[in-house]
Image (spheres, rainbow, N blue to C red):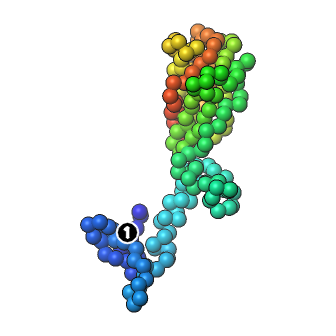
Amino acid sequence: MARLLTSATNVDAGSTDYPNGRVRDKDGATAGTTYNEVLHGDIIQFFQKLIIDSGIALNGLPDNVTNGYQLYEALYGTEWAEITTFGGDGVQGSDAAYGKLRYRKDAQYIYLKGSWDNAAAGNGFTLPAGFRPAHETIFTTYKDNVGTKQAYLVQTDGTVTTDSGGTSGLFIIPGVIKLPLTTDS
């Protein structure tokens, strides 16, 4: 917190259990902690900064099951979404264990997991705007679930293709790939 709780009025002093003080309820003649900017301003700004950094467009509704939990999404990142743009004749993967190729992000990273099929060498997919890495990155996949590895290059424009000498087949990300976000994502 940028300001100590003890800087607010009517709070309990610091203790071993609550080193920076504790909010106090009104109890008869004892004054309770006042709801004011000093006490709650930093908390509100924390959530505003989460929203700004996440890039989530606010829906203007209270967070709940019906409207969605936008503050939660801002803290933990976006939900997994399927890749929809493939190069050449690439399509979503058919591997039952790893599922379709998906992506998500948090405030610092893009995550990839799943599988995809390429009938021709070199084809890959494209990450949508807002889900692109800060610099070119290479990651390794498994081909046809038999342990043959294939490197893929992720470019800053979101284009993902095999390095030279790539082959066709089913490609699997065994786990989750983590790529650093651009500063403008």
Residue 4 found in image quarter? bottom left
Circle 1 residue: 4
Left or right, residue 68 beside residue 38: right
Can I make out residue 153 in this image? no
Dot 1 surroundings within 10 Å: few (below 14), some, or many (20 or more)? few
**Residue at coordinates 64% horizontally, 12% vertically from top-left?**
168
**Height in image: 102 above or below 118?**
below
Query: At 38% from the left edge and 87% from the top edge, which residue is drawn?
Result: 30
User: Residue 171: x and y, percent?
Assistant: 59, 19
- Residue type at mark 1 is Leu
Q: Kindly identify the residue that appears in the image at 50 percent across and 13 percent down.
A: 147
Question: Which residue is at the front of the view, 100 or 76?
Answer: 100
Task: Write down the quadrant of residue 62 in the picture.
Answer: bottom right
Residue at the outermost bottom position? 29
Image point (62%, 32%), residue name: 102
Image quadrant occupied by the C terminus? top right
Can you say whether 50 is above or below 173 in the image?
Answer: below
Q: Where is residue 129 in the image (x, y as percent from the top left)?
A: 66, 38
Report helix, strand or loop for mark 1.
loop
- In the picture, the quarter occupied by the N terminus is bottom left
Q: Give the left or right position of residue 157, taking residue 183 as reference.
A: right
Residue 76: x %, y % from top left: 53, 47
